[in-house]
Image: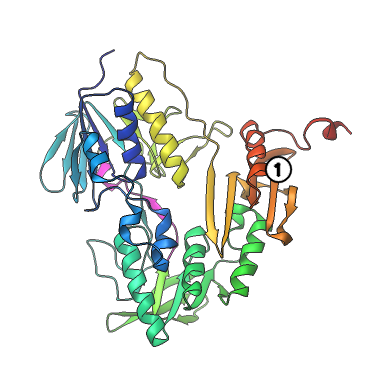
Amino acid sequence: MTAPRRIAVVGAGAAGLHTAEALRRAGYDGRLTLVGDEEEPPYDRPPLSKHLLSGQWQPDRLTLRDPRALDELRLDLRLGVRARRLDRRARTVHLADGREVPCDAVVIATGVRPRRLPGAGTPGTGTPPVGAHVLRTLADALALREDLCEGLRTGGRLLVVGGGLLGAEAAATAVGLGAEVTWLVSTGTPLAAVLGTETAALLTGLHREHGVRIHRGAATGLLSRDGRATGVRLADGTDLAADTVLMAIGSEPATEWLADSGLGLDGGVVCDARCAAGPGVWAAGDAACWPDPRTGRHRRLEQRTNATEQALHVARNLLAGPDGTTEAYTPVPYLWTDQYGLRVQAFGDPGAADRFEPVDGSPEEHRFAAACVRDGRVVGAVGIASARALRGLRAQVAAHAPWPPGPARAA
């Protein structure tokens, strides 16, 4: 099978860059176009809410590859321009600047866009009030950092809306800088759906110990006056006042440019088990939605490690061609978060567990590794400062192994 002469990778984040690199490492020597809507060369996003927001890092530390490494990839690099449309029949990616990218195969790696509260505006349809932020891009992080620094000088109040990892990391970073922080979360323990109840309770306690005020409720809209954010309104009619608001309320796949492509776009770019979305079309990273091998249900993973692993998988399958040997993508999801000097790591789906089984240390020590079990099977693992024991649980997560393991189960 002859490899495609022209491949377009749309999305210049981690998934897009790693796809391009994997193709070149595998010997692909055809035309390789990488399209990105930001002006900056590919950079890493996880440090945005931590190292960059705190001021410990400057933007150049986030760059994934230096100019020489990018040059060695021999890319047709199109930065600062959005993909506007995919014409699958003509095998062409149409760009917002009017140019076209002909391709024999395309990899969709356009990621996600952050959701905003009503009243916050959206790109292209309205200017958000000053002091209203999302946190997805380098520009977002720098703007939030500037507002935080100004707030530290004037006594400003930061309101973080959203109980996920991004909101937790930003709250921890901001309070570490000395900001007055309120964290608005829905009912229940924030982060429990991601890390499990026990680990989430530990982190929530640390937030409180460090001075973060946790408020429970649902935000229905952003409040502003004279073009400046003043807080949010809650479903019960309460207003929470703030000088700076970070909306960390989740994201949605950036797939609007594919609306008339004929591809499945239900919760992301719908793929088969190999990450193929259609003939000659593949997807990797945050926007890709493929069947979970255990449940058969389609899922997306907004995780940095997945962006790399899925990109490598897509590159191999793409070059194998329709007549070659391709493989299903069967990852073991992995995530980490840094908060208050602790690195929490997790495999699988700890939030789905109904039992928490420590195998090393304990949450009270802030050092532990634990199996997360549901219906007698290991569905996840989570740990802090216990890397060896946590790695030992990874294989059990991958195998959906019974718990307790081995002879202990028969006892």
Does residue 360 appear to the left or right of 93 in the view shown? right
- Label 1 sits on residue: 374
Residue 231 quadrant:
bottom left
Q: Position of residue 157 (x, y in %)?
A: 44, 81
Q: Position of residue 165 (x, y in %)?
A: 51, 58
Quick one: which residue is furthest to the bottom in this view?
154
Does residue 126 appear to the left or right of 200 in the view shown? left
Residue 146 quadrant:
bottom left
Q: Is residue 258 magenta?
A: yes
Quarter holding the N terminus?
Answer: top left
Other-residue count near label 1 (Cα within 10 Å), few / some / many at <14 / 14–19 / ≥20: some
Examine the rendered structure and indicate whether residue 399 appears above or below residue 69. Answer: above
Q: Position of residue 248 (x, y in %)?
A: 44, 63
Examine the rendered structure and indicate whether residue 359 appears above or below residue 398. Answer: below
Quarter holding the C terminus?
Answer: top right
Q: Say which of 23 and 123 sits in front.
A: 23
Q: Residue at x 53, y 48 (%)?
A: 335
Q: Residue at x 13, y 38 (%)?
A: 100
Find the magenta span and give its range: 247-259
Q: Residue at x 77, y 34 (%)?
A: 405
Q: Amino acid at mark 1?
A: Arg
Q: Position of residue 268 (x, y in %)?
A: 39, 43
Helix, strand or loop at mark 1:
strand
Q: Is residue 338 magenta?
A: no
